[in-house]
Amino acid sequence: MLVTSAARMKSLTLQPKRQKIIDSSWGELGFGVSYLNTGNSVGNDIFIGYAGWTVRQSWAQKWITELYRARLAELGIRHLYSVKGPRDPEYTSLEIANSALGNHLLEIAESAQRCIIVAHSSGSYVAHELLQQLYESGKDQGQTAGKIIYYNLDGGTTGLSQTIVNQLAAMYCVYVDGRLGRSANALEMEQLAQVYAPKSAVIRIDGNSSGCNSGAHWCLHDVLINQKPHNSSTFDLFKDYFWLNENHPVTVDYLQNLELPNNEEAFINQEAFINQESFRDTEDYFAEGMLAELKHLGILEGYKDNTFLPDESINRAEFAAIVAKAFTEQPVTRETQQFIDVQREDWFANAVKFVTTRGMMSGFPDQTFRPEAPLSRLEALVSLASLIESKHQINHLEIYYDDASAIPDWALKAITKATDGEIVVNYPNLRQLRPRAHVTRGEVAAFVYRTIVWQKRAEDKELAYVVVP
């Protein structure tokens, strides 16, 4: 049986809109496995995403988050599982905590109508291990039988059996085809579908508009994650999983044969959670794209009414909270300090501890941190400059800033580093650093975004107000 990417769901009277993720915090179930309850009011269904070889957990989470925004939310998916890629191509180490995933899945599966499993490349071997645990060891007592729809995205074929496939609702073997050639495991997908027919089917995705070079089968392999892979000759797993955006959109074509929930209650409930790609009050803000991406990454949360108030000033505690959330992997470099104005029960206590033990902020000689004191643009940039390294020698800051003379001597080295690292954003005048001005929430977000760009954790967005040496 063949299902083409042109196949579309039947027309529905009620089509729920996409929903944002209500709780953007993934929880760990075990090594390599994360879980997120989105709170989706459209349905209570389940999605498990297995990433390919060596894909890190944060990359897998970004891929699944984008799948949720683009397609899964309207399908009624509430429960998301993100699984990192195996450390070797055929998953011989068996290091992923599938048993923890399976136990958790069985606790919630009875109330779900369907469970969608998508496995890319070597991630298919990890997915097959889960299916073995469910159906060949007797672990599943009917909770998932007939509910799992499995999509093997150009992956492996071993690890399945007729016993397993009989328990599935359907299995789809997906590959890329077209005048540019075929993805790396296209033949294996065709053969796998034949072995387990009629329970399995082939889905061919058109790769002609992918931008891949002719015959670049590993680039076409990544088309199943990213419609326009970043490397036209081969794969770039980090960028193809993590740098998903309007120019490199997530691939959802293989899911188009799934029907949307069709009930009025789901549609009415969904109206209360219309997806917001950005904050409600940043549409015309100069750094709107940066704020939107930081929101998608879970770094910025905003307020309950989905506003961010980008022009409001920010205090030291609020800055510490944003920075602590944005740079979680920074190592400890200093001993813990005790401040007389920071109590253990304060909402910002952990953030203050984080930034001070990483050398990103310091207290004052009177043993205070002054959490409610406003922060200057200079102080914000000096803090973030501690996270980057200079590549070039800059001798005269007055070349870039008309008000360079206002930079105090103690901050010259840090601002030089911030300028070289292209984390300085000056709006509306590119040549005005305004070092002593109170920094705004939007400016902090822009500085933070530019810093994670320097760390190669986000895509460089062209912006006229970034100071470029």
Image (tube, rainbow, N blue to C red):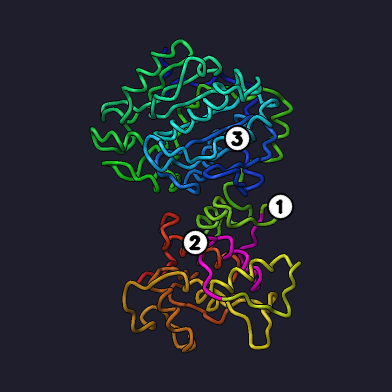
Where is residue 48, by image quadrant?
Answer: top right
Q: Quadrant of the C terminus?
A: bottom left
Q: CA distance from mark 2 to mark 1?
A: 23 Å
Span shown in magenta: 307-334
Q: Which mark is residue 245?
A: none
Q: Amino acid at mark 2?
A: Tyr
The residue depicted at 57 percent of the width and 38 percent of the height is 81
The residue depicted at 69 percent of the width and 68 percent of the height is 349
Residue 28, compared with residue 117, is above or below; it is below
Q: Amino acid at mark 3?
A: Ala
Q: Quadrant of the N terminus?
A: top left
Q: Secondary structure at mark 3?
A: loop
Where is residue 394, by image quadrant?
Answer: bottom left
10 Å neighbourhood of mark 2: few (<14), some, or many (≥20)? many
Give the mark toward the camera: 3 or 1.
3
Q: Nearer the viewer, residue 205 or 457?
A: 457
Q: Nearer the viewer, residue 262 or 243?
A: 243
Q: Amino acid at mark 1?
A: Asp
The residue depicted at 62 percent of the width and 49 percent of the height is 25
Q: Which mark is residue 449?
A: 2
The residue that disc 1 covers is 305
Q: Earlier in the sequence, mark 2 or mark 3?
A: 3
Q: CA distance from mark 3 to mark 1?
A: 21 Å
Q: Earlier in the sequence, mark 2 or mark 1?
A: 1
Q: CA distance from mark 2 to mark 3?
A: 27 Å
The residue depicted at 52 percent of the width and 53 percent of the height is 293
10 Å neighbourhood of mark 3: few (<14), some, or many (≥20)? many
Residue 311 lies in magenta, yes or no? yes
Residue 152 image point, x, y percent: 44, 27
The residue that disc 3 covers is 73
